[in-house]
Every structure is written in C-alpha cells, then in structure tokens.
C-alpha cells in the first residue's frame, strides 16, 4: 500500500472521528445514526493511522505531498 493521505487530511479525519465519539458518548447521536457515525469514525481513524484511503485510490486522488529526489 502506497501512502495517499497527507498530514492535514489525516489530522482532520482524526478530529472528525473524535467529535463523533464525543457526540455518541453524550447521547447526542443515538440509534442507527449513531451506529453509522461510529463506523465512519472507525474507518476515518484506521485510514488516518495507515495513511491510506481506498476511496482515494479508486478515484485516483492523493493528498500526500510528492517528494522530489535529485540525483
């Protein structure tokens, strides 16, 4: 797996996941909406940890900065 997520993208996803978990903990999100949001938060956390988003691969997108090597 080649990394396709930049640092800002990873941080934003982790922040969104933390907000979702907080909302579920406070019973703001409940029921089916809460379950779907929790699954989405788990996916966001996992993709942030591994720096790879399968959806980005499907659409040919990357937010990872390109490193230029001279030599």
Image: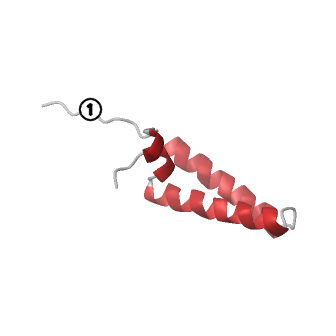
**Which x, y percent locates residue 40?**
65, 59
34 vs 16: above or below? below
26 vs 17: above or below? below
Q: Residue furthest front?
A: 58
Residue topped by disc 1? 68
**Which x, y percent locates residue 45?**
57, 60
Res 38 quadrant in image:
bottom right
Question: In percent of the image, x 48 and y 60: which residue is there?
Answer: 49
Colour pattern of the rendering: secondary structure
Question: In percent of the image, x 34 and y 55: which residue is there?
Answer: 1
Q: Residues within 10 Å of mark 1 (few under 14, many from 20)?
A: few
Residue 6 in view here: no
Res 41 quadrant in image:
bottom right
Q: Nearer the viewer, residue 2 or 69?
A: 2
**Which x, y percent locates residue 26?**
85, 67
Count the numbered circles shown: 1
Quarter placement of the C terminus: top left
Q: Secondary structure at mark 1?
A: loop
Question: In percent of the image, x 61 and y 46: which residue is there?
Answer: 12
Q: Residue furthest left?
A: 71
Question: In percent of the image, x 44 and y 53: which residue is there?
Answer: 52
- Left/right placement of residue 28 relative to residue 20 reads right
71 vs 43: above or below? above
- Left/right placement of residue 49 relative to residue 24 reads left
Residue 67 in view here: yes
Q: Nearer the viewer, residue 35 or 48?
A: 35
- Left/right placement of residue 57 relative to residue 16 reads left
């Amino acid at each position: 797996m080649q990394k396709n997520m930049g640092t800002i993208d990873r941080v934003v996803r982790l922040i969104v996941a933390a907000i979702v978990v907080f909302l579920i903990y406070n019973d703001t999100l409940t029921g089916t909406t809460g379950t779907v949001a929790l699954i989405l938060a788990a996916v966001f956390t996992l993709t942030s940890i591994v720096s790879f988003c399968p959806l980005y691969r499907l659409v040919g997108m990357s937010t990872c900065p390109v490193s230029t090597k001279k030599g």
